Image (cartoon, rainbow, N blue to C red):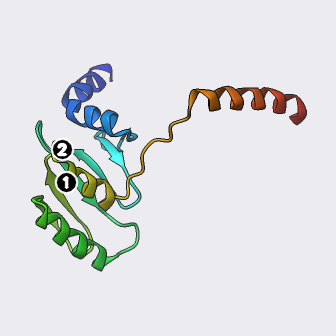
Amino acid sequence: MEARSETASVDNQLLQQFSTTKGLKTRVDVDGTLIIPGKLGHIYEYDHHTLAVVVVPSSPRKNYWGITRKKLANLGFTIIQDGDCEGAAAFDPSKPEQVKVAIGAARIFRKRRVAPSQIGRQITWLRAAAGRAL
């Protein structure tokens, strides 16, 4: 099990670097693939130089994929899969326009960042509230 996680971290260096620089959350999918999850899809590492965005709405939204596919194709994405209501497209993570559209297509939200001053206030509030809860 440790060997698998070690090779997974080596294989997904591009995705990990991408998620760190963009402030995005990562998780391991059911099949063991590292992904950046979103509301309508996810981003994964397609090969060592490109990433791919998968658009899979939870309820069938045929128009959403059709409109998104045209937008992705116009920006230079390579359409990998093209279904009726879902699909996938590969993109270059060094192109800011493609990154912005890929994150938006899968409806991925950035990690919440808390200021250090806010952390101190929250800790004091939680300590004070802990005594009142009992």
For the residue pair 123 and 53, the one nearer the viewer reads as: 123
Residue 4 horizontal/vertical position (percent): 27, 26
Taking the spot 9% from the left edge, 59% from the top edge, the residue there is: 76
Residue 86 horizontal/vertical position (percent): 25, 68
Residue 2 occupies quadrant: top left
Q: Mark number for residue 98?
A: 1
Q: Mark number for residue 14?
A: none
For the residue pair 31 and 116, the one nearer the viewer reads as: 116
Q: Mark number for residue 93?
A: 2
Tell me if label 2 and label 1 are in contact, CB under 8 Å: yes
Residue 70 in the figure: left or right of residue 120: left
Which quadrant is the N terminus positioned in? top left
Taking the spot 19% from the left edge, 30% from the top edge, the residue there is: 11
Residue 66 occupies quadrant: bottom left
Residue 26 horizontal/vertical position (percent): 37, 39
When the figure is inspected, residue 26 is found, relative to residue 41, above or below; the finding is above
User: Circle 1 sits in a helix, a strand or a loop, which is it?
Assistant: helix
Q: Amino acid at mark 2?
A: Pro
Taking the spot 19% from the left edge, 51% from the top edge, the residue there is: 52
Taking the spot 41% from the left edge, 58% from the top edge, the residue there is: 39
Residue 47 horizontal/vertical position (percent): 12, 41
What residue occupies the far front of the structure in this picture? 117
Question: Label 1 crowding class (10 Å Cα cut-off): few <14, some 14-19, many 20+?
Answer: some
